[in-house]
Image (cartoon, rainbow, N blue to C red):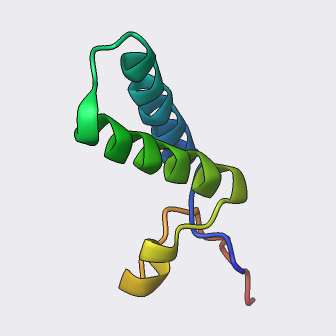
Amino acid sequence: MKKNMGSIDKIIRIVVALLIIVLFFAKILSGTVAIILLVISLIFILTSIVGFCPLYRIFGLTTCKTKATNNE
């Protein structure tokens, strides 16, 4: 599994996930929407840890910096 997530992407996902979790435990989010957002936040955390997003693969996206090669 080739990594397709850059550092900034990982940081943004973790911050958003933590914000959702805090809002849930502060009882600002509740009900079905809260459960769905919690699942999404867990997915964000897992994909950030692994560095791979399956949706990026499907759509051919990557946020990783590409390494320049010198073919001189």
Residue 47 lies, in percent from the top left, at 59, 57
Judge from the rendering whether residue 12 lies leftward or rightward of residue 68; answer left or right. left
Quarter of image, res 52: bottom right
Q: Residue at x 42, y 85 (%)?
A: 58
Q: Nearer the viewer, residue 58 or 20?
A: 20
Judge from the rendering whether residue 14 lies leftward or rightward of residue 27; answer left or right. right
Quarter placement of the C terminus: bottom right
Q: Residue furthest bottom?
A: 71
Quarter of image, res 14: top right
Q: Residue at x 28, y 26 (%)?
A: 30
Figure check: 19 above or below 28: below
| Total marks placed | 0
Residue 9 lies, in percent from the top left, at 49, 48
Q: Residue at x 48, y 30 (%)?
A: 15
Q: Nearer the viewer, residue 14 or 29?
A: 29
Q: Residue furthest top?
A: 26
Q: Nearer the viewer, residue 30 or 50?
A: 30
Figure check: 49 above or below 56: above
Residue 61 lies, in percent from the top left, at 42, 75
Quarter placement of the N terminus: bottom right
Q: Nearer the viewer, residue 64 or 67?
A: 64
Residue 27 lies, in percent from the top left, at 33, 13
